[in-house]
């Protein structure tokens, strides 16, 4: 696996695909700089080698050229974070971009305009990718968030750098972290899979079944499993059309000797709202008119114990409706248990949109081994898929 550490960038122009798809407020100010900070080590190493950096990214989902999606809005923020004044060019291909790239001096950074102002980007157009490739000497992919897309800048462009292409430090770390969980893991390995629906995680559960010792199933998806096992789940979220898959997963786990841990009690609510009435129920005996929205106290103790004895932990998906304070305890206790296990030497990886949001919101981000930056990309890797952006560098 070639990374930027295998290259010396002295007098070289690095064409770097970053993921600067950051949230902006109504004044076009960046409200969460995580993704810019995540790309910093790669950019700085290239500058320190004596090279220059040409940054390309998308922002939002523009239909053609739309001012509000211009990357010019983030120039100040990127300059502040990198500690270098960055240059900006109002197109990502063509004469202007080529001129700006040619004039770039060692130690300088150029940010290109939003790649998605050109429909060819998402279409994975080869001609467009070739135009992009003209701008730099070495192609670096450091955008994990889009590595599952076969777009021009994330995948297709790599073919124009047969020898001179590599992973940035962020993307390399994402791959290594997942490898540390699924392939080079210290046992016991525990995966916590939560979130709303079984349907979105079926392939993940099936793929990790061989690689983990314990699977904790939490959140809304647990109820389909409990119903399959004959429980009365009241009005809890359930996918009746996925009961056969839930059964298949339970059978598979038995065959493979993987332990599936389901909640045993829940915080049930009389409506899906922040001020609902609540009661603690056995998960197999939830009254009609009530729905489970969080793990109950016995479940939290049980899940925490499984985590405490684990040496490798993967967390994807919240344990309850953590967005509402009343139903956040299960998710917080899970975060606490993972933080404690990590302090005791376990390796922990948190990935997938909502669990990352939860980990940040409750202050666990610094207490786990690694927080992934890619939601969809991480899920696809957990499903065992080869991501086109990663494959294009390895080829
Ligand atoms: P996902 O995008 O599939 O990871 O699901 C995340 C969402 O699942 C979060 O917004 C949670 O509020 C929601 N969730 C977790 N537990 C439950 C539950 N018991 N009932 C309904 N939604 C839930």
Image (cartoon, rainbow, N blue to C red):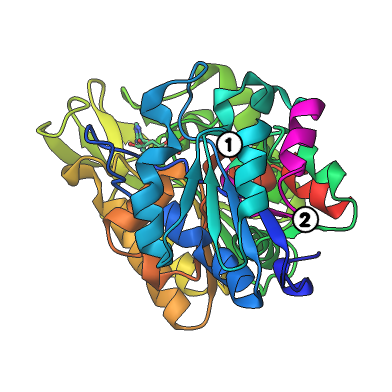
Left or right: residue 79 compared with residue 52: left
Residue 220 pos. (x, y %): 40, 34
Quarter of the image that includes the N terminus? bottom right
Q: Is residue 392 above or below residue 247?
A: below
For the residue with label 1, is its CB less than 8 Å from the closest atom of ligand 1? yes
Residue 69 occupies quadrant: top left
Say whether residue 240 is visible: yes
Does label 2 or label 1 sit earlier along the sequence?
A: 2
Secondary structure of the residue carrying tag 1 is: loop
Say whether residue 387 is visible: no
Residue 90 pos. (x, y %): 50, 34
* Residue position marked by numbered label 1 in the rendering: 201
Q: Is residue 284 above or below residue 349?
A: above
Nearer the observer, 223 or 100: 100
Secondary structure of the residue carrying tag 2 is: loop
Q: Is residue 383 above or below residue 173?
A: above
Nearer the observer, 253 or 35: 35
Residue 253 pos. (x, y %): 68, 47
Residue 386 pos. (x, y %): 78, 44
Q: Residues within 10 Å of mark 2 (few under 14, many from 20)?
A: some
Q: Which residues are magenta?
A: 126-145
Camera-side mark, 2 or 1: 2
Residue drawn at (71%, 46%) of the image: 135
Nearer the observer, 163 or 179: 163
Determine the CA span between mark 2 and mark 1: 40 Å
Quarter of the displayed picture in which ligand 1 can be seen: top left
Residue 294 occupies quadrant: top left
* Residue position marked by numbered label 2 in the rendering: 137
Nearer the observer, 16 or 38: 16
Task: Verify whether residue 141 appears in magenta.
Answer: yes
């Amino acid at each position: 696996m070639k990374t930027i550490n295998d290259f010396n960038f002295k007098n070289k122009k690095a064409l770097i695909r970053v993921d600067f798809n950051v949230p902006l407020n109504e004044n076009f100010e960046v409200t969460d700089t995580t993704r810019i900070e995540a790309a910093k080590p790669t950019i700085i190493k290239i500058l320190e080698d004596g090279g220059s950096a040409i940054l390309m990214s998308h922002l939002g989902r523009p239909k053609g050229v739309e001012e509000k999606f211009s990357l010019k809005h983030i120039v100040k923020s990127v300059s502040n974070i990198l500690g270098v004044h960055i240059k900006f060019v109002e197109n990502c291909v063509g004469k202007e971009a080529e001129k700006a790239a040619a004039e770039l001096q060692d130690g300088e950074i150029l940010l290109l305009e939003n790649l998605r102002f050109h429909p060819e980007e998402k279409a994975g157009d080869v001609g467009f990718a070739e135009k992009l490739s003209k701008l730099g000497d070495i192609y670096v992919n450091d955008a994990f968030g889009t590595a599952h897309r076969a777009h021009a800048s994330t995948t297709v462009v790599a073919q124009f750098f047969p020898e001179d292409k590599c992973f940035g430090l962020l993307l390399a770390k994402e791959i290594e972290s997942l490898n540390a969980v699924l392939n080079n893991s210290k046992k016991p390995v525990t995966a916590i899979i939560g979130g709303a629906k079984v349907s979105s995680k079926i392939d993940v559960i099936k793929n990790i079944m061989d690689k983990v010792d314990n699977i904790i199933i939490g959140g809304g998806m647990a109820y389909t499993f409990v119903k399959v096992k004959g429980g009365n789940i009241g009005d809890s979220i359930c996918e009746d059309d996925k009961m056969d898959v839930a059964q298949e997963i339970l059978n598979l786990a038995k065959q493979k000797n993987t332990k599936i841990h389901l909640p045993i009690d829940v915080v049930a609510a009389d409506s899906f709202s922040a001020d609902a009435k609540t009661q603690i129920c056995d998960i197999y005996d939830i009254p009609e008119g009530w729905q489970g929205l969080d793990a109950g106290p016995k479940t939290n103790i049980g899940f925490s114990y499984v985590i405490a004895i684990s040496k490798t932990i993967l967390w994807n998906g919240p344990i309850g409706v953590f967005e509402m304070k009343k139903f956040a305890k299960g998710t917080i206790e899970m975060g606490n248990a993972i933080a404690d296990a990590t302090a005791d030497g376990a390796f922990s990886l948190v990935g997938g949109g909502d669990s990352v949001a939860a980990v940040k919101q409750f202050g666990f981000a610094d207490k786990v081994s690694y927080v992934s930056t890619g939601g969809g990309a991480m899920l696809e890797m957990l499903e065992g898929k080869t991501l086109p952006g990663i494959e294009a560098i390895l080829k």
